[in-house]
Amino acid sequence: MEATLFLSKPLPTIKSSHSFSSFYPNPFLPSKPHKISFSSKTHKQSSSNFTITAAISRTKKEETVETVKNHLENCYLLAAINYKGFTVKQFQELRKSLPENTTLIVAKNTLVEKAIQDTQWEAIKPCMKGMNAWLFVHTEEIPVAIKPYRTFQKEKKLEDNDFTGACFEGKFYGPEEFKSLETLPSRAEIYAKLLGSLKSPGNALVGTLQAPARDLVMVLKAYIKKLEDEQQQG
């Protein structure tokens, strides 16, 4: 940053037509003093400063990519939010309103795209346009994690700053499909439905419970997935 500010006002170049005598008349200097130019030295200094600036910029980009990759670890959902028109104050308020298991990051689309390359998160590529803030959800309770932004959006009257899309379990959800993510059943709701379905017939319940533990786990997982698929389709 310091190098950039330094380069915003380049040092003036002393033209070759000027000599020391023109700046500081001195009777002890020869009548025709040698002309000395600093243009070459100034050019070298500028080139060096440009190199430093480029190195800082490249390092910052690499750090951003690594930050995105780190947040994608143990991430259940990645969503993009159109933040065009947001103020700094609104960003600060929004971050404070989010639960601890979610993170909001502002990063260029190109850097996020580089971070998700060759991963399941590539499904979110349709969002790689416009100005996006990226919401990382690190909990299975997706609706609970999304709700704070919906509340903030409504209170601040930010209808245009909606979700532009999301990636969940390797699948892309556009704005028109986002409702299905916001209405996903919680883990407690799934278990409640599961237990309710196992109450009858009694023989089926006894037979299931007598099965090996591994088989029981497989049955439970299959049933939970079935409920989730039905919820998404509905």
Image: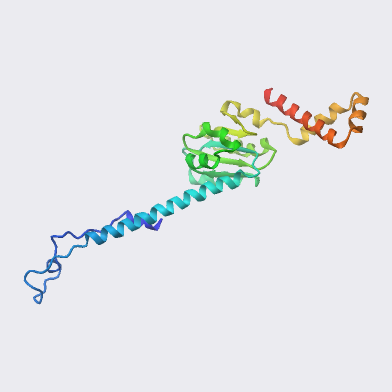
| Residue drawn at (84%, 26%) of the image | 197
Q: Is residue 188 above or below residue 19?
A: above
Q: Quadrant of the C terminus?
A: top right
| Residue drawn at (55%, 48%) of the image | 67
Q: Position of residue 56 (x, y in %)?
A: 43, 54
Q: Position of residue 4 (x, y in %)?
A: 37, 54
In this view, which residue lies farthest toward the left? Answer: 31
* Count of numbered labels shown in the rendering: 0
Q: Quadrant of residue 24?
A: bottom left
Q: Quadrant of the N terminus?
A: bottom left
Residue situated in front as seen by the camera: 43 or 28: 43
Colour convention of the picture = rainbow
Q: Is residue 119 above or below residue 28?
A: above
Q: Position of residue 226 (x, y in %)?
A: 75, 26
Q: Along the horizontal axis of the image, is 182 left or right of 122? A: right
Q: Quadrant of residue 198?
A: top right
Q: Quadrant of residue 153?
A: top right
In this view, which residue lies farthest toward the front? Answer: 118
Q: Is residue 49 above or below residue 187?
A: below
Q: Along the horizontal axis of the image, is 112 left or right of 208? A: left
Q: Position of residue 66 (x, y in %)?
A: 54, 48
| Residue drawn at (68%, 38%) of the image | 144
